Image (cartoon, rainbow, N blue to C red):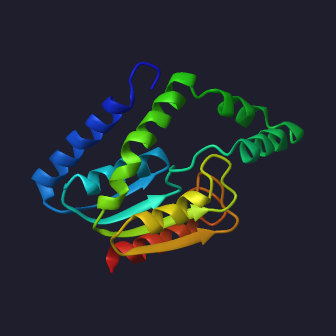
Amino acid sequence: MRRTGWTEWVRAAEQEAGKLSAAFGAFDLVGFSMGGVIAAHLAAAGYPVRRLVLLNAAIVYISPRRFAAEWLRRVRERDWENVQKLRQVPLRATLEFMKLVRHLKPELRRVAVRTLVLQGLNDPIVHPVSAGLLSRWIPGEVELRYFPKSKHLICLDCEAEEVSRTVIQFLNE
């Protein structure tokens, strides 16, 4: 991510979506954080997405207040490993990510597939308001679920089992 930009990230996802559609026809798509924005783009762009799952999809990202609170909590707990992780994301990648959201956000209004939106309410990276916006902007059928204890890594957090059950049930319907 230090040497590539948002257009390369999207192009790589489009190439993989092309391979999936050629091999299997329609496919289910799950996107996490920035990957959720890219997944919604693929669904809007006409790839044969059967169902779309967006996990803490980053439409409204990095709430400075929430991020600072999380950083301070980790410092107070002397969680130096995770303090370092918070500092590892290159500035260029963050700026490219912001461009990606700005360019792809309008496409949400073209997502016509059945969509599940899951959001951790304690996410310090993606503001929880993102989930509500997604559910209003996507014109297709949208199911919205909040997980009150989960942070950004919703699939690994304290409600991971319930998150997994929810996704599996949605994909099997």
Furthest toward the bottom, the residue is: 173
Furthest toward the left, the residue is: 22
Furthest toward the top, the residue is: 3
User: What's the residue at 22%, 48% (across, down)?
Assistant: 17
| Nearest the eye: 2 or 129 | 129
| Tally of numbered discs | 0
Q: Position of residue 12 (x, y in %)?
A: 27, 36
Vertical order, 62 against 118 (above or below)? above
Furthest toward the right, the residue is: 76
Q: Quadrant of residue 64?
A: top right
Left or right for 145, reference 51: right
Q: Which quadrant: the N terminus?
A: top left
Q: Position of residue 105 (x, y in %)?
A: 41, 49
Left or right for 1, reference 123: left
Vertical order, 155 against 144 (above or below)? above
Q: Position of residue 16 (x, y in %)?
A: 23, 43
User: What's the residue at 47%, 21% (across, down)?
Assistant: 2
User: What's the residue at 36%, 75% (across, down)?
Assistant: 141
Left or right for 98, reference 61: left
User: What's the residue at 27%, 57% (across, down)?
Assistant: 43
Q: Position of residue 78 (x, y in %)?
A: 85, 36
| Nearest the eye: 155 or 8 | 8
Left or right for 10, reference 144: left
Q: Which quadrant: the C terminus?
A: bottom left
